Image (cartoon, rainbow, N blue to C red):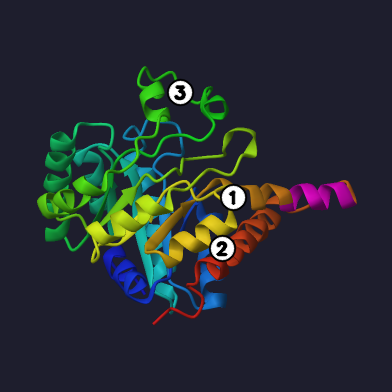
Amino acid sequence: MLYPMSELLSRALKERYCIIAPSIRDESCMRAAIEAAEELNSPMILNCMFPSWDYDWDQGDSEAIRFQVALAREYALRTHIPVAINRDHTPTFEGCMQAIAAGVTSVMIDCSTLPFAENVQHVKEVVIAAHAAGVSVEAELGHVGIGDVQDHSETTNDKDFELEANSVLTDPAELHEFIQLTGADCVAVSIGNAHGPYAKKIIPHIDFDRLSALRKAAPETPLVLHGGSGTGDENIAKAAKMGICKINVGTDVEAGAWKAIVEIYQAKGRVTNPFSVARKGYKAEIIRQIKLLGSENKAW
């Protein structure tokens, strides 16, 4: 069943559970995510990346994007569980419209490095167009940076990389106004989390007092946590219970894929079907996180 992401998250907010949004790179990721959700009777958000994590957000092949979304829609329409297809980070109106035309049910407009007024302006424009098409909108207030800058340093020559790398915590005093001005369906917040692996695998400090204040500032709006990988199971579970309704996870599920391959290679000296093995490892980590986040048996 295919839904706007807002419907999945509104139910999660009401019942105080969280839905994983794994990074979807290809068909194997889609299949693994749907299978995991079906087995645990959980809602699922396919967090599509166009292209993969390379900071060249809107230079993807439009034909490839349409194919990827068409495939995601086919999986969603064939399953009994609620599924949303979300176009992850894009900083432009044009990128969001391209994704909507391809058939996603949610877009994330990320103008979090811009000043407050400019962020509001861009998000509001996307909200008006997306809502007219029945598509939900995720925005970001504050800025979720990068956990290990060195790990990502070879992926880009973008002059703004240093700005992208630095996190700016979300101000609770701005959140209510931001939602009122933009009409965004959900908001990604920065509370000590970061994208990608963390330097030296250090578990970050999550500011739960700030999260509590953000929740009070926006009691009816689902909040999102980016950079779920490496944040620590205890932190993730607590955040879910405090009103984080969606957690983006890329590094951890992808690590599950390659670890599965390594284990078989070390045991047998060869891997005859690495793609199948990788899918099973990716799926196993999603299953673990669904249980951690409390969305098991929350499908309708």
Compared with 295, 142 (above or below) is above
Q: Is residue 108 visible?
A: yes
Placement of the C terminus among the 4 image quadrants: bottom left
Q: Nearer the viewer, residue 92 or 251?
A: 251
Indicate the secondary structure of the residue bearing disc 2: helix
In the rendered image, residue 279, in percent from the top left (x then y), is placed at: 63, 57
Return the disc, 3 or 2, that comes first in the chain's sequence.
3
Amino acid type, mark 3? Thr
What range of the chain is rendered magenta? 260-267
Amino acid type, mark 2? Gln
The answer for how far apart the CA atoms under marks 1 and 2 are is 10 Å
Q: Nearer the viewer, residue 156 or 31?
A: 156
Amino acid type, mark 1? Asp
Give the mark count: 3
Q: Residue at x 47, y 40 (%)?
A: 195
Question: Does 16 lie within the magenta span?
Answer: no
Q: Nearer the viewer, mark 3 or mark 1?
A: 1
Q: Residue at x 15, y 59 (%)?
A: 131
Return the disc, 1 or 2, that comes first in the chain's sequence.
1
The answer to which quarter of the image holds residue 64 is: top left
- Specify the principal SS of the magenta part: helix
Indicate the secondary structure of the residue bearing disc 1: helix
